[in-house]
Image (cartoon, helix red, strand yellow):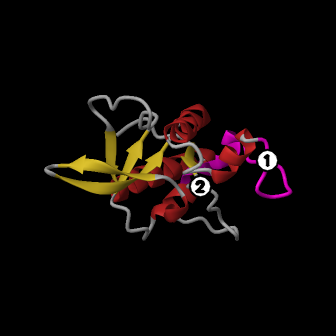
Amino acid sequence: MDGWQERYWLVRRGRRGPATGERWVEDFVCCEVPVGEDTAMALEVFTSRERAEAESRGMERLAPGEYYPRAADKHRGRSTSGGPDETLSDRVNEFVGYELVEMLDGSGVPYVLVDPPPVDEPIPEGLRIELTPVFAEGLGRRLLGEMKKGRA
């Protein structure tokens, strides 16, 4: 596969978030993808912040308050905490390629779904579903190539 890039974006699941600096695949939105006659779990990976934010907006439109309870309370004119409310952008985390590879390594999630359409839009033909090890290996090769260029 070509089109590897330096940065990717993931959408956090609800208010779950890393209490420490560690991030786990389970902290981010995964979905079921078709694999032959069956389905399997895939991490949703976005190639732009805009696409990730569109997914976050779609999730909130489809089930207000289910994914992001604080957002639902904000729309009702109150906050569940005394602090500032999260915006859609706050629910999107940016990853450098090697961070994503580290998070995927040993995650147990078999697939990566790259740039899925927002959850509230129709699913087009030809979803970009990658085996997790193949996706991680491609990112690793790209990063290694960049490192070699930097030394040349």
Residue ranking furthest to the front: 76
Residue 92 in magenta? yes
Labels 2, 1: front one: 1
Position in image of residue 92 (x %, y %): 63, 46
Position in image of residue 143 (x %, y %): 52, 50
Q: Is residue 135 above or below residue 5?
A: below
Q: Quadrant where the C terminus lies?
A: top right
State which region is magenta.
77-97
Q: In the rendered image, which residue does mark 2 sit on?
A: 14
Residue 9 in magenta? no
Number of dots carrying numbers: 2
The numbered dot on residue 78 is 1
Pick whichever, 59 or 43, lies toward us.
Answer: 59
Residue 125's quadrant in the figure? top left
Position in image of residue 57 (x %, y %): 57, 36
> Tag 2: residue type?
Gly
Q: Is residue 151 above or below residue 52?
A: below
Position in image of residue 23 (x %, y %): 60, 65
The numbered dot on residue 123 is none
Q: Quadrant where the N terminus lies?
A: top left
Residue 123's quadrant in the figure? top left
**Residue displayed at 13% across by 50% down:** 37
Assess disc 2: are there few (<14), some (14-19) or many (≥20) residues with their C-alpha within 10 Å of its C-alpha. many
Pick whichever, 143 or 124, lies toward us.
Answer: 124
Q: Is residue 117 above or below residue 134?
A: above
